[in-house]
Amino acid sequence: MKEQGRKVIASNRRARHDYEIMDTYEAGIVLTGTEVKSLRAGRASLTDAFASVDDGEVWLRNLHIPEYTQGSWTNHEPRRTRKLLLHRKEIERLIGKTRESGLSLVPLSMYFSEGKVKVEIALGRGKRSYDKRADLAKRDANREVARALGRRVKGMG
């Protein structure tokens, strides 16, 4: 029986905090058997991961997939470089964007989609510390407004 829908394995919550996201892409990823088994157990970390374009191919570096516990000598290396699968036009667009405007390729999440492992990568521009503070202040203000509205609706404000 084939899996339906989308089951998130790991997400990179720091990415949206550290980068201003411009564009997102869904990419397949080349994995070995023990890596897929480890991911099925829901174990992966996108914390330090990043993508780069080398020789017309996109590579995901520093993605941590822990070794499969029941694996034998065929087990994988936890932080090996893995190839991402994208359409040629998407890769050419990424090459242009990363070269000309200094954007980074950041993985946002990793998930199973119809039984296949997919990675959502984004073109992002690094935020400066004052941008991050402004975003936090805006989010806090919105939360406070929502709280006040909630109290008014309940007749307590």
Image: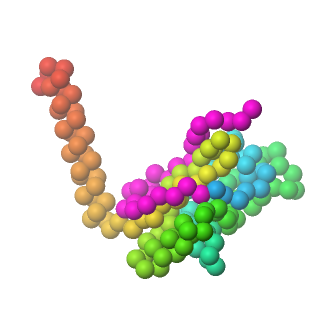
Figure check: 153 above or below 62: above
Answer with the quarter of the image where residue 37 lies: top right
Figure check: 40 above or below 103: above
Residue lying at 54% horizontally and 66% vertically, measured from the top left: 90
Residue 58 shown left or right of residue 140 in the figure: right
Q: Nearer the viewer, residue 109 or 4?
A: 4
Which quarter of the rendered picture does the C terminus lie within? top left
Q: Nearer the viewer, residue 149 or 23?
A: 23
- Residue 32 visible at all: yes
Residue lying at 40% horizontally and 77% vertically, measured from the top left: 101
Residue lying at 27% horizontally and 58% vertically, measured from the top left: 133
Which quarter of the rendered picture does the N terminus lie within? top right
Residue 133 shown left or right of residue 52 in the figure: left
Residue 135 position in % (x across, y down): 28, 55
Residue 104 position in % (x across, y down): 47, 69
Give the magenta part as a residue range. Answer: 1-27
Residue 73 shown left or right of residue 26 in the figure: right
- Residue 9 visible at all: no
Residue 13 shown in magenta = yes
> Which residue reaches farthest top?
155
Residue lying at 65% horizontally and 49% vertically, measured from the top left: 117
Residue 73 position in % (x across, y down): 87, 56
Figure check: 33 above or below 114: below
Residue 40 shown in magenta = no
> Which residue reaches farthest front?
89
Q: Nearer the viewer, residue 54 or 133?
A: 54
All told, the count of numbered labels is: 0
